[in-house]
Amino acid sequence: MQDLAYLFHGFAVVLTPFNFGLMLLGIVLGVVIGVLPGLGAANGIAILLPLTFTMPPTSAIIMLSCIYWGALFGGAIASILFNIPGEPWSVATTFDGYPLAQQGRAGEALTTSFTSSFVGAFFAVLMITFLAPIIARFALRFGPAEYFSVYLLTFCSFVGMGKGSPAKILASMMIGFALSTVGIDIVTGQLRMTFGLTSLLKGFDFLIAVIGLFGIGEILLSMEEGLAFSGATAKINPKVVWETWKKLPRYSFTFARSVIIGIWMGVTPGGATPASFMSYGAAKKFSKDGDKFGTGVVEGLVAPETAAHAAGTSALLPMITLGIPGSPTAAVLLGGLLIWGLQPGPLLFQEKPDFVWGLIASMYLGNVVGLVVVLALVPAFAAILRIPFAIIAPVIVVICAIGAYTVNNSMHDIWFMLGFGVVGYVFKKLNYPMAPLVLALVLGNAAESSFRQAMLSSQGSLGILFSNGLVGGITALALVMLFWPLISKGLRSVRPARTTKLPEEQPVD
Amino acid sequence: MDEAGQRGNDGRSVVSTRTMEAVVAALLFLFGATFVYQSYELGFRWAVEGPQSGFFPFYVALIICGSSLVVFVNALRGKAGRSDESFVERGQLWKVMQILIPAAIFVLGVQLIGIYVSSVIYIALFMRFLGKYSWLKSVLIAAIICIALFFMFEVWFQVPLYKGRWDLTSWTGY
């Protein structure tokens, strides 16, 4: 009950005029970022982060998280009207959204997708409200070994649940860890991996990696595809909204399933993008109109949008309770916490209830306000996409450069950003996943020091990772996740053929 | 369209996905190997006070080497199909370079003459030559954008940006 009191206090914090204004500003900026290709939630927030250094942390997190909600909404606009996914998680939205818009039902499609996003986010926030305090209280008992096993689970989940080559997922994750070791070793104070270069003394800041990989990389890809914006016009009026809302309850089951998929994929670091595809696939499989999917079915819009928003929101649960972000965007917000001088993790709930509950309250309000803002301003946001690419592209490069510079006031970082951009372009084309790289770069130091502390207390025995039921259970789950590609392959080959082959003998790829 | 437009539509392949996979995997292996060597130099074993600095990066780098080997082998004996497709066509590479090379020159410009002046030049030239806007329109829009950025960062949020080795905006007093 005390938590509910805190929540209402949180609402009071958010509803002060200053914070409410920042919330509106965040939503609008977020939608703009979400609509523009090349500017996504992760790098958009990374670029704007330095502007919040002087704000009180609670106001800063409200604005930045609202940019996130706005970007989640905005991705759908470009997908539906222009068939261009503004964000990776809105790719699945184009499948049925764009055909609907071509049939002249753009208003209906937009309303459906915004409402689905809202429903997904709402249930995810409800989940966070009730689960977060419990998890935080539980996590207070965690020692270094427990923390390391949770990190292990986070990273092994990428391998177990990710799509594509496990070797590439591992490689990309380990590059992140390797880059995180560059600079001063936080335990012994020794310099590592600097190759004698002074510009590497401070190491690689993950914000630079985010801006380069997602910002510059995305611009290069958009340019290669030769973007030509030509799309349906958006007309949306209260009547269309009302008519659409009346039809939506018949998809309650799809909503429920998508919410569950989204929350699951968000809490485990699957992220919004796989969640949206998975939910779309499930809806297609279970719907009686399954074969019509892709031609403009409302249900095919409900599923990915609900799941993407539910996943995007619930990715914040492990971030605020354990200090482990569930997505690159959550990682950037986590970076913000550190810069504002807050230590993310379970203690945050006790030491800074204002901050935590302000954030949770802003999730509720931000999504309500976001829904109203996008419904009201769709034509204005769609107009942004009509600005020619020859203006947008250099402006985005300039903004990325500014963002990279302001992180540490370092000119070297702009060069690193450009380098990460080329890496991002090549990796994206070769299907190396980028989220594990970014998360490993963020969590590298924390994971390493918890590992070394655990090892110190056990005198170097890995047995500490199985020393009690809790840590042993998490470690075992992590190992199952890590070897899941092998296990599932083994199961598949054993079951139909009934051979006695050892699963381990199956090749990974 | 002129020559540039034709070059942008050149569909000949520059490099196949298979080759690119192998090259990237080889580069990753090298990257991992340098880190293994560095960790070895730092000491990757146990000292009296616990694991040495190279302990963690050593194993991380070993995994990079291992997984890049797997990717490399898979690329070489990969099934025909996707891996024989083109990684990038000439026209596409031309378009990518059209944005990458100016961006690199822009970053060099930032280093020398600061972010504001080089942004004006960069945006204006980009609009003039890739967007085919008139000189007047290009320069005007570029200048407006950069002045807006100047006010936003230097004046309102008081976040000073890089002015370059030769500061051309010192007369503004910021």
Image (spheres, rainbow, N blue to C red):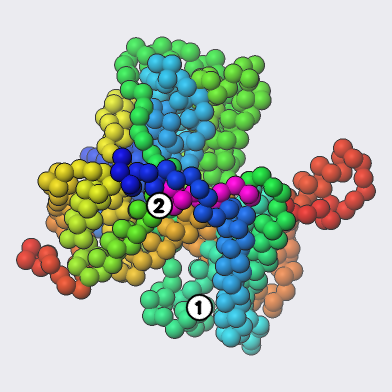
Question: Which one is in front, A80 or A183?
Answer: A80
The mark closer to the camera, 1 or 2, is 2
Horizontal side of B117 relative to A445 (left or right) equals: left
Q: Residue flagged by tag 2: what amino acid is it?
A: Trp
Horizontal side of B142 relative to A409 (left or right) equals: left
Q: Is residue A197 visible?
A: yes
Picture coordinates of residue A182, whole percent (x, y): 48, 74
Q: Residue flagged by tag 1: what amino acid is it?
A: Met
The residue under label 1 is A193
As drawn, B55 above or below A73? below
Mark 1: few/some/many CA within 10 Å (<14, 14-19, 20+)? many
In the image, which disc is placed on residue A456?
A: none
Question: Which one is in front, A222 or A300?
Answer: A222
Magenta-drawn segment: B83-93
Residue furthest to the bottom in view is B48
Q: Are marks 1 and 2 in contact (CB under 8 Å)?
A: no
Q: Report the chain holding disc 1.
A: A
Mark 2: few/some/many CA within 10 Å (<14, 14-19, 20+)? some
Residue A486 painted magenta? no
The residue under label 2 is B94
